[in-house]
Image: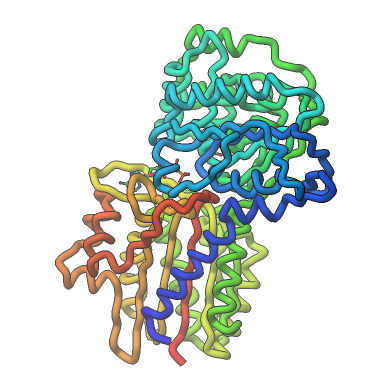
């Protein structure tokens, strides 16, 4: 197996991860129809021309078709009455959307993930549809990441512009997604469970998670989950980031919050997929493609932090593995707890990783560690890039430096990519890097870049990872898969294999 075959295996494993979280597959798996009843998660719902669909998020368009199909009974009667789906601007054309259900209205909005008048119009239409439902109707709600921006409905007197400004300021000041959505929930007519409160119809929500640990009440700001935030939660977030509360905002927050958390007996919230689902897809692919020779391990689904720092720490981890593969058993190095912590790896994985390295040393098979999560980039440069490409570039530079003196003969590879296919404001999903030594001959991506006159460190410090990977070897190591129609954050594969 040569270096480029291994790189292509990793690319295929990444694609397999994406494939396992394609929304149409996930939704189809949760729905059955028998005797004029829709069966969802073991619960039965009578079909009597009483079904409505609403959806909002970057990955919901793909959920529509399997749902619509399940609503047609064997007598060819469709029990779907109406549907409204709010999706990102341009996404229908990009995805070649071919859904032909006349009852469903697809509306685009929220260009660049920013709520706008178009998304507000979609939200108003969704609200009036939901308000019009009767007790014996069934409302299917399709939810995925990006849903917050696609269902904006500021509580009056707050305007869309004011609410957007608050969220933008918080985001620029470094607020996390849970902090942003805590604020969004308190300022909205739809978020934080308020969509569910608009009707007594039965509701089933299908939720695809794009947040670490899948907190259901935070994904797309939890429109069908009770808001359990404390009454002062929003003011605390604003205070933390030094954002002044305007009069309109104060008047919205002063409204009496319910003293008891709301219960929604008419609502079922189902998580249909998340980052862990994709990690399993990657793992299966690697096991199959290596004929079970390499035992891949999922080490984390909560990787977060500054992308370039994480890239550096990935190189540190690779160095420990490489050292342990090249030494004899008495000289094994430990995996420092601080390294595990920085890479968001639970300490209970430590012995599993060390055992795998040992097996690999004895048998000559590879070590493959799989990560998922979402890093961030503090952009200070003027270049073009994304968090995955930046992580890989930083790892590449550090691998080249750390492994200079190593006696290891084998290959080290890292891939990082976004499952939505779009890394930051670029048309790439991510990138891959490698380092390899056969006898005394070393090949590395950094060496190759330097021989082409590219200076990796200069690109990294200008946050210009996209330009770097586009130019290097004519874009050979950049991952371009286009919009995938799904979104469960990012995936990383670290693969180290000794030469036999
Ligand atoms: N030049 C750059 N280099 C590296 N990262 C960048 C650059 N410019 C923007 N980014 C990062 O890209 C991210 C924005 O990309 P994107 O639109 O994919 O955001 P997102 O909200 O994280 O979307 P999603 O969660 O759906 O992937 C930000 O985290 C930003 O720091
Ligand atoms: O829409 C949102 O709120 C984010 O994508 C998190 O789910």
Answer with the quadrant where ligand 1 appears in the image.
Answer: top left
Instruction: Check the picture and name the quadrant holding the N terminus.
Output: bottom left
Q: Position of residue 417 (x, y in %)?
A: 44, 58
Q: As drawn, which residue projects farthest toward the left?
A: 453
Please tell me which residue is depicted at 30% across the width and 75% down the height of the picture: 444
> Which image quadrant is residue 428 in?
bottom left
Give me the residue at 58% from left, 56% from top.
Answer: 21
Seen in the picture, residue 452 relative to 310 is either above or below; the reply is: below
What residue lies at 45% left-to-right and 37% top-to-bottom?
88
How many numbered callouts?
0
Q: Position of residue 422 (x, y in %)?
A: 40, 50
| Res 422 seen here | yes
Q: Is residue 178 visible?
A: no
Left or right for 432, reference 130:
left
Q: Position of residue 500 (x, y in %)?
A: 46, 92
Q: Residue 263 location, x and y as percent?
A: 80, 27
Q: Is residue 261 above or below residue 95?
A: above
Does residue 85 lie above or below 197 as drawn?
below
Q: Nearer the viewer, residue 332 or 70?
A: 70
Q: At 60% across and 44% down in the image, what residue appears?
A: 64
């Amino acid at each position: 197996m040569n270096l480029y075959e291994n790189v292509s295996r990793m690319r295929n494993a990444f694609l397999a991860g994406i494939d396992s979280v394609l929304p149409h597959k996930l939704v189809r798996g949760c729905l059955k129809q028998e005797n004029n009843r829709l069966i969802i998660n073991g619960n039965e719902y009578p079909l009597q021309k009483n079904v409505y669909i609403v959806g909002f998020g970057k990955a919901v368009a793909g959920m529509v078709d399997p749902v619509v199909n399940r609503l047609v009974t064997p007598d060819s009667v469709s029990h779907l009455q109406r549907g409204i789906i709010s999706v990102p601007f341009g996404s229908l054309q990009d995805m070649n959307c071919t859904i032909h259900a006349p009852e469903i209205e697809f509306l685009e909005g929220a260009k660049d993930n920013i709520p706008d008048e178009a998304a507000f119009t979609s939200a108003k239409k969704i609200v009036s549809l939901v308000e019009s439902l009767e007790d014996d109707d069934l409302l299917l709600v399709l939810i995925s990441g990006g849903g917050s921006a696609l269902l904006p409905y500021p509580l009056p007197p707050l305007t869309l512009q004011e609410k957007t400004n608050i969220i933008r300021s918080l985001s620029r000041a470094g607020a996390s997604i849970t902090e942003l959505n805590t604020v969004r929930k308190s300022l909205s007519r739809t978020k934080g469970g308020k969509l569910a409160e608009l009707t007594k119809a039965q509701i089933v929500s299908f939720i695809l998670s794009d947040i670490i640990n899948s907190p259901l009440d935070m994904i797309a700001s939890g429109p069908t989950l009770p808001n359990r935030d404390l009454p002062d939660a929003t003011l605390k977030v604003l205070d933390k980031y030094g954002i002044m509360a305007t009069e309109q905002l104060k008047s919205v927050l002063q409204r009496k919050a319910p003293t008891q958390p709301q219960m929604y007996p008419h609502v079922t919230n189902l998580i249909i997929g998340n980052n862990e689902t994709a990690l399993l897809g990657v793992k299966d692919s690697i096991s199959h493609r290596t004929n079970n020779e390499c035992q891949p391990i999922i080490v984390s689904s909560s990787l977060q932090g500054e992308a370039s720092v994480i890239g550096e720490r990935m190189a540190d981890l690779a160095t420990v593995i490489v050292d342990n593969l090249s030494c004899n058993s008495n000289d094994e190095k430990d995996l420092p707890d601080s390294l595990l912590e920085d890479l968001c790896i639970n300490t209970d994985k430590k012995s599993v990783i060390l055992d795998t390295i040992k097996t690999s040393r004895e048998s000559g098979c590879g070590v493959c560690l799989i990560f998922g999560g979402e890093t961030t980039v503090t952009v200070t440069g003027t270049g073009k890039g994304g968090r995955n490409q930046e992580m890989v570039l930083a790892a590449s530079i550090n691998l080249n430096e750390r492994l200079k003196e190593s006696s290891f003969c084998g290959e080290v590879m890292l891939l990082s990519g976004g499952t939505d296919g779009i890394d930051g404001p670029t048309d790439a999903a991510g990138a891959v890097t490698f380092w390899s030594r056969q006898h005394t001959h070393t090949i590395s991506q950094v060496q190759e870049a330097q021989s082409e006159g590219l200076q990796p460190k200069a690109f990294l410090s200008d946050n210009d990872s996209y330009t770097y990977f586009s130019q290097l070897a004519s874009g050979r190591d950049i991952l371009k898969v286009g919009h995938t129609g799904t979104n469960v954050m990012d995936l990383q594969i670290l693969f180290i294999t000794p030469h036999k």
